[in-house]
Image (spheres, grey):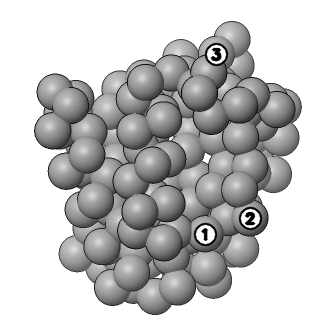
């Protein structure tokens, strides 16, 4: 696994914002060479819809404060699954039940994990 300090800057900022927001089960997948959609997926969970929305807002604030604007945001009003698309990085924030249902980790099992924080 990659150490935090060697993650790309924007990925590290997103992970830091998730941790500041008390997100859980953080996983960074390296999609380079597997997908043209993005280079990295950052996947994490919140404990409730409101918690997921709060984490998403922290990620948006952190990255936008560093000059990285979201290209697309989806699911923020509901908080069940929030997708933050920063082009090279896509952040997926889930309510635990929704994460268990969609199982992105299984869908992208060929992508090497760079970081996993329980």
Asked if residue 37 can be seen in this view, the reply is: no
- Cα separation, mark 3 vs mark 1, equals 24 Å
Asked if residue 60 can be seen in this view, the reply is: yes
Q: Residue at label 1?
A: 24
Sequence-earlier tag: 3 or 1: 1
- Cα separation, mark 3 vs mark 2, equals 24 Å
Q: Are marks 3 and 2 in contact (CB under 8 Å)?
A: no
- Cα separation, mark 1 vs mark 2, equals 6 Å
Q: Are marks 1 and 2 in contact (CB under 8 Å)?
A: yes
Q: Residue at label 2?
A: 118
Left or right relative to 13: residue 2: right
Sequence-earlier tag: 3 or 2: 3
Q: Give the quarter of the figure containing the N terminus.
A: top right
Q: Give the quarter of the figure containing the C terminus.
A: bottom right
Q: Residue at label 3?
A: 32
Few, some or many residues within 10 Å of mark 3 (<14, 14–19, 20+): some
User: Could you tell me residue 106's position as x and y percent?
Assistant: 81, 51
Residue at 40% x, 74% y: name it.
52
Mark 3 or mark 2, whichever is nearer to me: 2
Mark 3 or mark 1, whichever is nearer to me: 1
């Amino acid at each position: 696994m990659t150490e935090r300090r060697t993650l790309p800057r924007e990925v590290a900022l997103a992970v830091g914002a998730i941790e500041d927001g008390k997100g859980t089960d953080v996983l960074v997948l390296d999609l380079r060479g597997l997908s043209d959609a993005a280079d990295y997926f950052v996947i994490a969970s919140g404990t409730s819809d409101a918690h997921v929305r709060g984490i998403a807002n922290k990620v948006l604030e952190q990255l936008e404060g560093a000059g990285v604007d979201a290209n697309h945001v989806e699911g923020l009003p509901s908080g069940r699954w929030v997708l933050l698309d920063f082009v090279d990085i896509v952040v997926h924030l889930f309510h635990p039940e929704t994460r268990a249902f969609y199982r992105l980790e299984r869908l992208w099992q060929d992508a090497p994990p760079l970081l996993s924080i329980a």
